[in-house]
Amino acid sequence: MEVIKQARPDLKPSTLKNYKTQLRKMEKLFGVEFVDKDTQEIVEGIHTSGLSPNYQRNLFAVTIVLLMSLDKDKYAEEIKVFRAEMDRLNKKYVDENQKGELVSKNQKENIVSYEELRTYIDMVGADIGKEEMLHIAYVVLESLFRTPVRLDHAGLIFIGKRAFKHLTLEERNKHNYLVETRGNRGKFTFAFYQDATTNKTRPEEFQDLPKDLEKIWKKYLRVMKYQHGDVVIPLTRNHLSQVLRQTSERYIDKHIGSTLIRKIVLSEKYLDTKEMKEKQADFAKKVGHSVAVEDLVYVKK
């Protein structure tokens, strides 16, 4: 891992953590010195590992990153072979999506309808007085149901308008915010900068909360006794992901995370209304991707 850190110092901690996990898997499959193994042995071993195609693709990708960090010239042939395998898996993924096979086997077992998702969130909402973690899950679920960003609520900071305006762009880019634009628990706005899928900050994106969602957040802030400057979703992205999955398993015996919610909500909004491209483009900007990605990956056919 150290060689990767040195070669690519700008990688996010979450990315490095994923790389570390994937490299451990490679070591488990092929031994600690797997970089010196026969290339075809590694290719065949990954393909017969029983791992999902997406995870196989990740193993090829992390191996490429490691070899390029070690010596891209020395391992040029190995990198070429592994890149071809990764590209083949990428093409398979895209081809399946274009055919309408947009839900993985695991997602097929867990996907619910838009109406069932709404019912599940209401079930959680009825129990928020029982556990603090349920209340956290509930406000995030309600927010995702309206605008299904990734896990961008993790680490969300509550801040007043005046304090927010005094932040430099560099300071803003380090976090995502819930901005109170008027006093006395007035108007709320999400200000998103950090994106889970890239080391770069996303374009500045402000999302005014609808009144019904504002009411939900106001109650949450009041019950939790949060003030300006507090981290109001005190979880990492990984922890928040676990909380969402555990909560859905508890209530409806399904594993429903932010990705599946995106698929469900976006399919409901745009599957039968493709003429609404302007609205879809605006919505895609809010959730942090393009219309092309939205159509290809998230909108069911």
Image: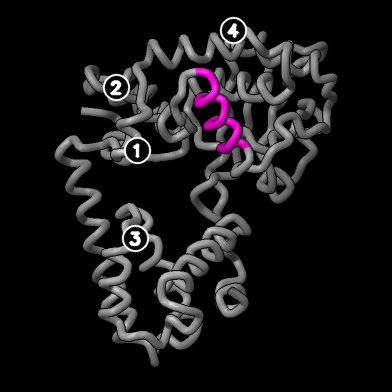
Residue 157: image location, x then y, percent:
74, 34
Which of the 4 quarters of the picture holds residue 34? bottom left
Residue 286 visible in the displayed image = no
Residue marked by disc 3 = 56
Which amino acid does the dot numbered 1 rest on?
Answer: Asn
Residue 38: image location, x then y, percent:
31, 85
Separation (CA) of disc 4 from disc 1 = 33 Å
Residue marked by disc 4 = 212
Badge 1 crowding class, 10 Å Cα cut-off, few under 14, some 14 to 19, many 20 or more, is few
Look at the numbered disc 2 and give the secondary structure of its residue: helix
Residue marked by disc 1 = 106
Residue 138: image location, x then y, percent:
61, 19
Residue situated furthest bottom in the rendering: 74
Badge 4 crowding class, 10 Å Cα cut-off, few under 14, some 14 to 19, many 20 or more, is few
Separation (CA) of disc 2 from disc 3 = 31 Å
Separation (CA) of disc 1 from disc 3 = 16 Å
Separation (CA) of disc 2 from disc 1 = 23 Å
Residue marked by disc 2 = 270
Query: In the visual, does 82 lie left or right of 197?
Result: left
Q: Which residues are magenta?
A: 240-251
